[in-house]
Amino acid sequence: MKLNRIGFLIKEGFGNIFTHRFMSFASVTIIVACLLIMGSFTLVAINIDAVITELEHQSEVMAFVDESLSEKKARALETELSAAANVREVKFVSREEARDNYISQYEDPTIFEDIEAKVFRHRYVIYLDDITQMTETVDAVRSISGIADVNDYSSIEEGFVTIRNVVSAISLALIVLLLVVSVFIMANTIKLASFTRREEIAIMKIVGASNWFIRFPFVVEGLVLGLLGGGIAFGLQWGLYDLVNTRIMTGLAAELFQVIPFQVLLIPVLSIYLVIGILVGIFGGNIAIRNYLKV
């Protein structure tokens, strides 16, 4: 195809956008809204996944050694604890260290300076590989002779994992649903434009114009609208993300978890938005013109 012909078809595609301004505006608005909803849920899922991953990295249980065991025998349990399934690392904490750690939590440590180490028990801090297997790991540690008790936080950890799975499932369902909606709206918008030119399209088919020659302007129209919608959605998503991030990263919430900076996600989010916008536009354009090519 010659360059001047391609230029003519591109010009026609842009012309369709301005000819049907209201529908073009509606298409871009729908794409922006769909991408914002999809993006927001996906970014929430990404942040929750990052929090869970960090919890998994820091996940630990506290195993208390039987009081009747000496420090030497208590330390001898390390090998058996390390061999347990799902255990990444174990750290022995003596009575003296446990006492010092307890006292250090208070602003005035002199209040408890007379407390004796024998009040505390030898213990192990056990770091896990997989947070979802905490219950099984706790049961395995409890079964080891010489371990008197184990702090079990499995219900809390499993709650976080459940939240992550639910949010991920909702995000995936919304992405699929909103992609279908976006393509449908885009197709109908371009179909309206093509309906007013159906006789022209029929004549072009009769005189021998190829399907590609007829389809190209509509594909350009869909591509431009999709690209525009993706770009606007990206800008709005950036501003919305930073606004929410600023509100969350204050007070107690900032101590509980860290939100991933948008700058870290900037390139992937921009690429995905533009690609989805372009694909939705092109696919919608092809669907819209398909029936009018059957002459």
Image (cartoon, rainbow, N blue to C red):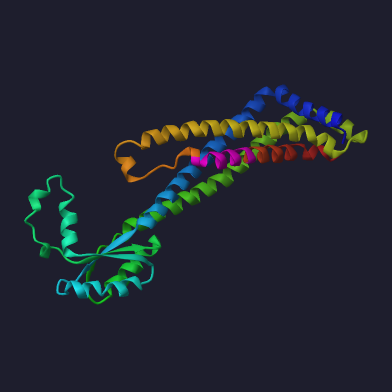
Q: Main secondary structure of the magenta part?
A: helix
Provide residue 178's location: percent of width, then percent of height.
58, 41
Q: Residue at x 31, y 74 (%)?
A: 79
Provide residue 3's location: percent of width, then percent of height.
85, 31
Residue most extreme to the bottom = 145
The magenta span reads 264-275
Q: Is residue 95 left or right of residue 261?
A: left
Kindly tell me whether residue 220 is visible in this rendering: yes
Residue 274 lies in the magenta-colored region: yes
Provide residue 288's location: percent of width, then percent of height.
74, 37
Q: Quadrant of residue 15?
A: top right
Give the position of the C terminus as an image quadrant.
top right
Q: Quadrant of residue 29?
A: top right
Residue 155 lies in the magenta-colored region: no
Q: Is 223 or 123 nearer to us in this picture?
A: 123
Q: Residue at x 34, y 68 (%)?
A: 137
In the image, residue 278 sits, relative to residue 141, either above or below, namely above
In the image, residue 173 sits, relative to residue 94, either above or below, namely above
